[in-house]
Amino acid sequence: KPVISTGSEHYFPFNAEWSSKGRELERFQTKSKKTLAKPGVKNIVLVEGVRTPFLLSGTTYADLMPHDLARAALQGLLHKTSLPKDAVDYIIYGTVIQEVKTSNVAREASLGAGFSDKIPSHTVTMACISSNVAMTTGVGLITAGQCDTIVAGGVEFMSDVPIRHSRKMRKTMLALNRAKTLGQRLSLIGSIRMAHLTPELPAVAEFSTAETMGHSADRLAAAFGVTRLEQDEFALRSHTLAKQAQDAGLLSDVISFKVPGRDTVAKDNGIRPSSMEQLAKLKPAFIKPHGTVTAANSSFLTDGASAVLIMSEEKALAMGYKPKAYLRDFVFVSQDPKDQLLLGPAYGTPKVLARAGLTMDDIDVFEFHEAFAGQIMANLKALDSDWFAQTYMGRKVKVGAPAMEKFNLWGGSLSLGHPFGATGCRLVTTVAHRLLKEGGQYGLVAACAAGGQGHAMVIEAYPQ
Amino acid sequence: FVTNIRSLCTARTHVNYEVKEDVAVIRMNDPTSKVNTLSVQMQNEMIEVFNEVLANDAVQSAVLISSKPGCFIAGADINMIQACNTSEEVTKLSQEGQKMFARIEKSPKPIVAAINGPCLGGGLEFAIACQYRVATKSKKTVLGTPEVMLGLLPGAGGTQRLPKMVGIPGAFDMMLTGRNIRADKAKKMGLVHQLVDPLGPGLKSPEERTIEYLEEVAIQCAKGIVNKKISLTKEKGMMQKVQDYVMGIEFVRQQIYKTVTAKVMKMSKGLYPAPLKIIESVKAGLEQGPDSGYLAEAQNFGKLAMTSESNALIGLYHGQVACKKNRFGVPERPVKNLAILGAGLMGAGIAQVTVDKGIHTVLKDTTVEGLSRGQQQVYKGLNDKTKKKTITSFERDFTLASLTGQLDYSGFEKADMVIEAVFEDLNIKHRVIKEVEAVIPPHCIFATNTSALPIKDIAAASIRPEKVIGMHYFSPVDKMQLLEIITTDKTSKDTTASAVAVGLKQGKVIIVVGDGPGFYTTRCLAPMLAEAVRLLQEGVDPKKLDALTTGFGFPVGAATLADEVGIDVAAHVAEDLGKAFGSRFGGGNVEVLKTMVEKGFKGRKSGKGCYVYTPGLKSKDVNPDIEDVLEKYKLTPNPLVSSDSDVQYRLVSRFVNEAVMCLQEGILNGPVEGDIGAVFGLGFPPCLGGPFRFVDTFGANKLVEKMRRYEEVYGNHFTPCQLLLDHAKDSSKRFHK
């Protein structure tokens, strides 16, 4: 584990040119720390991050397979970085709903993308923070001295999900495989009933609690007293900001993708800034009739893939790259999957700040995963509550809520879309890009995930 | 602010209201109790508040809510009914309730009942008089009419409103069984209109915020009703229309009354008047109109309140509440790790009721087969709950993670309590206690689950007898509510406190009794079973014996009971206790039981006993092979004491006499525990309220008179004990006040 710096040790990796930028120096001197680099710990950098356009499921990507999307992201990364195809040590992908034919989607995608077949690749899963795990696994491999160059990514494909035969039918079919005589086969076939033909859809509910995530989000919003109006306002904000960012060409991580048999896609297609009046018309989607979570203030089912290139700083510089950001401290947290399913950011944020020795004010860029507007508002309220901090987090005081003028300024999962396995890389890349664009020093990523888990990571701007 | 001033002036303590926009939020909270009851005070203040709300022009609608976390209204105040001396007084109480709820029902300003926690009896009647009901999906939220279990009926309009709300069959089901209905089921039945999910942590405690949320939703509903966004007349579905049509046919209704009455008669043997009065009241309302209905309800309520059955059942209710408390205080250290020795029916049963209470449970047996049978029993118990959807499969697995099955004593050094449920043999128990004491920590309690062996004899092998205690569970452990805890004169108070605490966690009703052969329950049962054997020898057919005992109110007939307990166990106990107590425990010949055991007729577990048990078959036939046995030990009945009624009193008087003797000898702490033990452990007729209540009601002198008559024929088996004689001499002496 990285050691939390005590503050007495100062370590300056910055070059003189950067330090001479008086205005910015002044600004950063107000920070708790000048850098998060730690002696004896390798600096790990984000060299580049890309993603395919995030599309509403069932649209242009409808006929693809998950590894096709992942391959597109990988090829985009290769193209953007001009990385030699054998220069990578390891490839890791995150995904949630696995296509059974490509259960190690990392391997299928990297082979298809033309990476050397000598590069091992594996797939990880941790619900909506799967690609966060992919990245931190890479960080771990570099820190441990196993690797220098990692490609991490995530993919989710909701246009097609594995729908299975019922358990009884599967049992019969498997027995049929083993049946030796015609008589055995006939009697097995004869045992099939109409009811056995009912298919089994992938569960939308939390396994341990049998509650759907939307239902839990609605209860969470109610628990924190988040109103329908607040949720609709936040949803509208997300879509409006996403639209502005898209129009201004800020979403530079999006690569264009020629979909076989279809057009080239270059833009996310879920961004729909509407009006408060229109949003108010929607009926609650989960808790009826008095719930507050609607289709419009929830993230939608999305297809998409992302990829990032992570390297040790030395290696990146040696290969002539100009890194975009340092990946610094990170935490994974988990809590009660019933009543605190989506509170990962509230738990992860104070923890990662403490680990990095930073305060809320030190952070210039916040990128939180927006699963539901109600979930975001609940997390913000939790972060801003001394009572919650004391009662549930064992802290003396709250860390406070992020300033909204620093928060998800280029849209978020509500508007850009949320391919479960791919969102984490989008968040990290967006923080890096925003730090570059806005001139900040520290950024914070936080996300919740099914299972009551969460992730938070601090990212530091790379001196330009 | 104005409201606050006003409430201060009138000094209301139970009911208050505040106006939020145009909705009056009426809050109930009985400051003197953990639960809200419809006491006189509560009712008076409610009427006052209701009048104010009606008179307040700023108010369009109202929400009725409890500010107690986890309780809406638990029912009417039983003491209010018990304080009445005549049925007329009770009828008047009922009519006052009816009048109040009639006003609520006709209120021009809609009232929404916001229910969180128990909404039972009078509380439910209040709620269904309101125009709209919202309930939380909390596990604590239950709706029901449990009056029948107290020998009463829903006396404040319940018998009249329920049939209209949930249909005639549904209403009968609710009122005749008295069962609790969870919120989601209540919604399906049409008992509540809307459900609210319980909330988790937020900016306030989950409980507090959940009530607030419930209130917010209820206020929305109240406003919705006023501005006509919510319609109170529900669009009827096709099924509903068909059902209404069918129920509209008088012939059909008559058939229903007939069927329900027949079923009640079959189940209650006519010993319980309340169910019949419920049917009568419902019928009066449906067939002769509301005026007759409400009158019948009030009058029947008055009549029922004066019955001995109701008195007995209410006594049991109070007794049960008392036996759910730990009068030995808080134990020094809570039991977190419990080890059970023996994975038989009992051991596994104890494991099953422990493992889901947050206690890590070790189940130890000596063989893999025995252990896996026990583990399967625990799994099945939990899996059945999963099938019934009371727990999820995840909760089942999570619970089972607290159960460790093993064959050795590893980990016993962490045990806080060991309960042994090994074979009932003193030598084996001694060996076990020595083995266990070698591995457990000094604070660990050693509890022995035995049904007859004196605890002090078992404790004789212990190096720390202050930690030894008896915990007598009843089979099947997960179904039988009673736990009999036996203390020796060496058992420390903390050990007792700890055993009671564990028992309460396991959900048991607990009696704590002194040590002695058969303690309390087994000792009472033994003479009754001895009498049953004698009756069999005298040629009473097992079926007839069963019919006579169930006809007296026992849920299980004497012959069936012997089969359930096990003929071998019965023989064992009869012999042991016979030795301990001498000829008083005689009657039937123990050889009858022994011969049956020799022939393999050990009762239900061996497939044959008094009856033959065929797996999968509910009905059972008398075991034809026992005729030979009975023939061999045949006795000639004396016609003077062999009428049906005499047979019943021969069985019951021996039971009751022994119970009274247990009190006399100090085995029992008091008559309340005696009644609870007999009813919940042995199935003594609940309508009689237990042996002590029975003596009070029936009259000790009358009982002694009967016993003297039997004594003349059979000798000391029927000699009344001194305490019973004292009560017979002085009719002012009562076990219960």
Image (cartoon, helix red, strand yellow):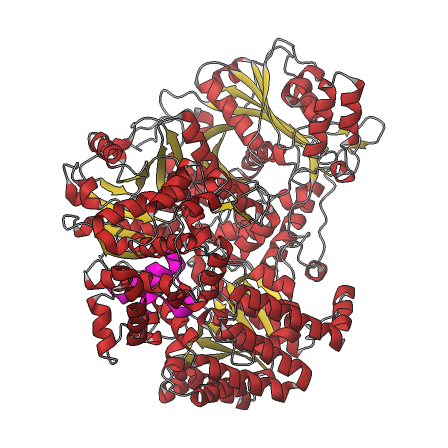
Place of residue A238 in the rendered image (x, y in percent of width and height, measured from the top left): 63, 49
| Image label count | 0
Task: Tell me: B77 left or right of B292.
Answer: left
The magenta-colored residue range is: B670-693
Can residue B644 be seen? yes
Task: Work out which residue is located at the far top of the displayed protein and give it.
Answer: A118
The residue at the point 28 percent across, 45 percent down is B575
Q: Is residue A288 positioned above or below A39 on the image? A: below
Q: Spot the residue most to the right.
A: A261
- Looking at the rendered image, the quarter that the N terminus of chain B falls into is bottom left
Q: Quadrant of the C terminus of chain B?
A: bottom left
The answer to which image quadrant residue B329 occupies is bottom left
Pick the residue in front: B97 or B288: B288
Residue B139 is one of the magenta-drawn residues: no
Decide: is B454 above or below A98: below
Residue B217 visible in the snapshot:
no
Q: Quadrant of residue B176?
A: bottom right
Q: In the displayed structure, would residue A279 be above or below residue B736?
A: above
Foreground pick, B688 / B206: B688
The secondary structure that dominates the magenta segment is: helix
Q: Is residue B553 left or right of residue A189?
A: left
Q: Position of residue A256 (x, y in %)?
A: 74, 29
Spot occupied by residue A241 in the image (x, y as percentages of width and height): 64, 47
Give whichever of A391, B235 is nearer the camera.
B235
Work out whether B165 lies above or below B328. below
For residue A379, side relative to residue B78 (left or right)? right
| Residue B680 magenta-highlighted | yes
**Residue B340 percent location from the top left of the image:** 33, 37
